[in-house]
Amino acid sequence: MASAMSSHSRVFLFVSLVTLALFGADALLAREGARAQEAAPLPDYVIKEFGEPPAVPEGPLSEALQSAVQVAFIDSIAQSAWGRDQTIALNEISESKDPRLAWIVSDLMRFVSDRDLHLELATAASKLLGKDFQGRDFWGPVTDHLIAWDIPAPPDYLQAKRAIFTNVVPGWDDIFVEGDIDWRLVSWGGVLIDDRAYDTTDELCNCIPAADNPEVSSAEDATWLEDEDIVFGIVVNGEARAYPRRIMEVREMVNDTLGGRDLGIPYCTLCGAAQAYYTDQLPEGVDRPVLRTSGLLIRSNKVMYDITSSSVFDTFLGKAVTGPLAERNLQLKQASVVTTDWGTWKKAHPETTVLLERYALGRDPDFRNGRDANGPIFPVGDVDPRLPVHEDIIGVITASGKPVAFQRSTAFVALKNGDEISYENVRLELAAGGIKAVDADGSDLGSHQAFWFAWSQFHPGTALWPQ
């Protein structure tokens, strides 16, 4: 990778957040005593794809490196300028050969639009990781290697990461706090935070706008939907509702009430996963979470948060990881989401309701066959090689707490042929053209469909059927 020429008077050019269109698109030690950190051996497939990881020192950064981090990453973002002092500090950081500091380089690189500075940061990351990165957009490959190699974070990492992110988007002030979250993996998804109050669905925002209490129609009146259109179907206490993918791809979050139960329904377009969480019947003193899109990602999975308490949730697991709700160890229970087509859903549930067309905002994206056709567009690191990254699976947690994924294509054929598919207490069954998981007594187990890369990275070591 060619080294970038530094310009001492260069203005620090960030991605312009003001002009973002809707859906636009985180040492050297004193050398004596330094020793490589011990880590679990990496799987062979990681070494094959990413190579051997660099040695990683442990312990605090030297005072000189701490000062360099302050100048290069914190002062530059606060002043929105990059000059001679920053270049000198970055050189000192890269010469340290401490791979941990590449996390902060990656964080800053994500927001830099100036080509020369991007190359300067990429050169520093290359020296820190001992890897010659090629191409034009270095942020993705650098971050993929950091994740795949599981490079530890540097000391005081959250402090530096918070300074970078909150200086770019002030709305993240309450998001970047200590908690049960791996801040290394959090990156910017290219959109701003949805911080609108509850029940302000139609209020314009420069964000991905959640829909609260959406209006619905009967199946008969939903003439705008074609039978082959994909919908996410949910049934609660006998009441059925369809959430068209066309709407969910532009809303990504719905707070709704169905069958007398409150629901938060996130859809991650990047993971192919629509999930439904019950947001009622919570511990005493806990108000209903109102879920919103933060504009952040973890390994290409959206990071959702509760607008009421500013608590962040692991979207894929439904667990509060920061804030007051994390302190209460809040874990949301799931209802099953069936991914199917509109024609089959309404035939199986003729009394179903469906969201109104206006919530699609006049858009009809097809991310799977367009933007995401060649795989994840954000860094995900290593992916379990047992299935292709975008293979559809049906995921569920067994009574023993074991995550299990069923390859959808194989399972669908087997079920159509009358075969039984089970794993521990889990039984699969056909449901309105889709698949859901039930317990031995037929009760709902809260399953959903997702891409394999997403399920496997949030449930490492998951069992896989039919293997």
Image (tube, grey):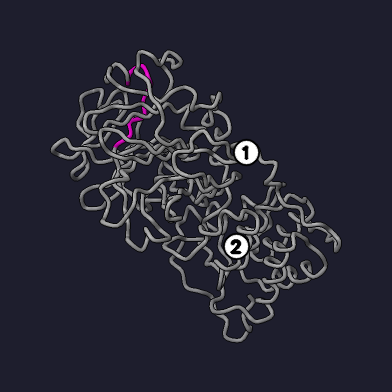
Q: Residue at x 41, y 46 (%)?
A: 290
Inter-mark Cα distance, 2 to 1: 24 Å
Q: Which residue is mark 1?
A: 24
Q: Give percent across and percent down for residue 245.
A: 45, 28
Residue 218, position in %: x, y? Answer: 34, 18
Would residue 148 be visible to someone looking at this image? no
Q: Which residues are magenta?
A: 336-345
Which quadrant holds residue 101? bottom right
- Mark 1 crowd level (few <14, some 14–19, many ≥20, 10 Å Cα): some
Report which quarter residue 341 is drawn in: top left
Quadrant placement of the N terminus: bottom right
Residue at x 52% of width, y 52% of height: 381
Question: Is residue 230 shown to the viewer in this render?
Answer: yes
Labels 2 and 1: the sequence-earlier one:
1
Q: Secondary structure at mark 1?
A: loop
Residue 328, how many percent across, how many down? 32, 61
- Tell which residue pokes out farthest to the bottom in this image: 32
- In the rendered image, residue 169, in percent from the top left (x then y), is placed at 62, 53
Question: In this rendering, would 32 be left or right of 10?
Answer: left
Please tell me in which quadrant of the rendered image residue 43 appears.
bottom left
Callout in the foreground (2, 1)? 1
Above or below, 286 relative to 451:
below
Q: Quadrant of the C terminus?
A: top left
User: Residue at image x 25%, y 28%?
Assistant: 239
Assess whether residue 260 is covered by the magenta stretch: no
In the image, residue 326 above or below residue 336: below
* Whether residue 466 is situated above or below residue 304 in the rendered picture: above
Using the image as rendered, state which of residue 8 and residue 392 is in the foreground. 8
Q: Please give the residue where the numbered disc 2 appears in the rendered image.
A: 103
Q: Is there a contact, CB below 8 Å, between mark 2 and mark 1?
A: no
Amino acid beneath label 2: Trp
- Report the front residue among 148 and 296: 296
